[in-house]
Structure formats: structure tokens, C-alpha cells
Amino acid sequence: MQDYCGEAKNDEVLEAGLRWLNSMRESELSQACARNPHELARTLEALSQATMNEIIIQATLAHKASSRLLDLKAPGLSGDGPAEWRNYMTIRKDNAR
């Protein structure tokens, strides 16, 4: 995840991250199985993590602020950046997946 949505990011790299997640979802995650409750918990954790990573990348793409850092509370960035950095964004997941 930090390779595609890390400290330095741009649309090209974020789109590559989405392609990688979709590829992983189609190959490995579509064949995931669990033989016991412990494996089931780890499998569900991996599926949830993939979904959260996709949400983070989609939100970063939608944000369109050109901040270099993901953490906008870093010294020098909280409050003194552009106004669009301080807006809230509503995110919802469609039933597509």
C-alpha cells in the first residue's frame, strides 16, 4: 500500500495501485478459503484490508489537493494549507463488490 499511496503520490501511481488491488482481488482473494475459525478470521481481515486500501486510494484521488503528505496534521500543514485540505469527504461503498 505504501508503494502506491505513500508520502509522495500522484494520479498515475494511485491508478496503478487500484489496478494492483483489482488484480489481487480477481486472482488471490477470489480463491480465498478457510479451513478453521482462525483462518477465517485472517481471511476476513485480508478482505477487509483490501477494501480499506481501495477506499483510501479512491479518497486520495478524489481529494485532488496536491499535498505531499497523507498526514495533514503534520507540523506546518494543519490549518495553514489551502482551504480544500480542511474539508470533509463522505465515502460510501457501492454494492459492486
Image: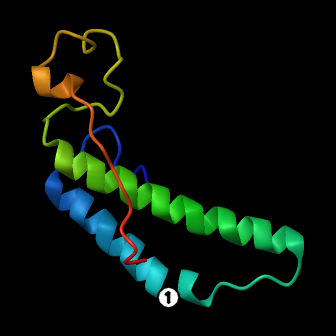
Q: Quadrant of residue 67?
A: top left
How packed is label 1: few (under 14 Cα within 10 Å), some, or many (20 or more)?
few
Is 45 rendered above or below residue 63?
below
Q: Quadrant of residue 87?
A: top left
Residue shown at the point (26%, 9%) measured from the top left: 76
Q: Which residue is mark 1?
A: 27
As shown in the figure, which amino acid type bears the numbered disc 1?
A: Ser
User: In the rendered view, does 30 fall on the left or right side of 5?
Assistant: right
- The image shows residue 95, relative to residue 33, as above or below, that is above
On screen, residue 51 versus residue 5, left or right, reads right
Q: Is residue 28 visible?
A: no
The reply, left or right, for residue 26 in relation to residue 6 is right
The mark tally for this picture is: 1
Q: Position of residue 33 (x, y in %)?
A: 72, 85
Quarter of the rendering occupied by the C terminus: bottom left
For the point 37% across and 78% down, which residue is it?
96
Left or right: residue 63 compared with residue 37: left
**Residue 58 in the image: above or below residue 38:** above
Query: Which residue sits at x=45%, y=86%?
Result: 26
Residue 39 can be seen, yes or no? yes
x 55%, y 59%: residue: 49
- Quadrant occupied by the N terminus: bottom left
